[in-house]
Image (cartoon, helix red, strand yellow):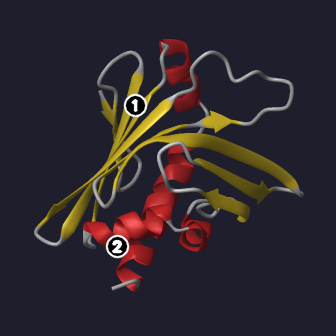
Amino acid sequence: MATSSGTAIITLPSDEEILITRHFDAPKHLVYRAWTTPELVTRWWAGHRGTMTSVEIDLRVGGRWRYVMAHGEGSEIAFHGDFREIVPNERIVTTEVFEMPGVDEGPEPPLNVVTFTEVGGRTRLELLVQTGTKELRDTILESGMEGGMQEQMDLLEALAQSLA
């Protein structure tokens, strides 16, 4: 199954996975830099749906990340996780937890595997979300995340191009 309303393509490799694939007209080291530098993440991660109030990235295995976005009438949403694997300019593996007051993270949060592959000066970014259950995968898909993700990816491309 493949779906898309924009430049990124979403496929479902299994009942517990979401794969987002997007090609960028920029070299992978610049896409990676925009993906991993706090002051740059601030410029693309919220898409057009809010503003980033905090971006913390401790880019090392065992390090943590946390993003907070203000949207609507002053409400905030936050996500955090830890880095499990880092191959500079090639691969990042992190957990990702959507912070919800009063909700426990559960035994094992979703895992994000991001790969950056350069072909002819362009970058193919693949973001594989491993949810652990079909229910969580479907909840993520039904959350409306695709619209924001498409905005993020377009802004990320423009930002990476501006770094050249």
Residue shown at 66% from the left, 17% from the top: 106
The residue located at (67%, 53%) in the rendering is: 67
Kindly tell me whether residue 50 is visible in this rendering: no
Q: In which quarter of the image is the N terminus?
A: top left
**Picture quadrant of residue 56:** bottom right
Crowd rating for badge 1 (residues with CA inside 10 Å; few <14, some 14–19, many 20+)? many
**8 or 63, which is in the foreground?**
63
| Amino acid type shown at disc 1 | Ile
Mark 2–mark 1 Cα distance, whole angstroms, equals: 24 Å
Where is residue 143 shown, x and y percent of the image? 61, 33
Residue 124 against residue 11 in the figure, above or below:
below
Q: Return the residue found at the far left.
A: 120
Q: Measured along the vertical axis of the image, is residue 137 above or below residue 28? A: above
Which labelled disc corresponds to residue 18?
A: 1
Q: Nearer the viewer, mark 2 or mark 1?
A: 2
State whether residue 147 appears in this view: yes
Write down the residue under mark 2: 30
Camera-side residue: 13 or 42? 42
SS for callout 2 = helix
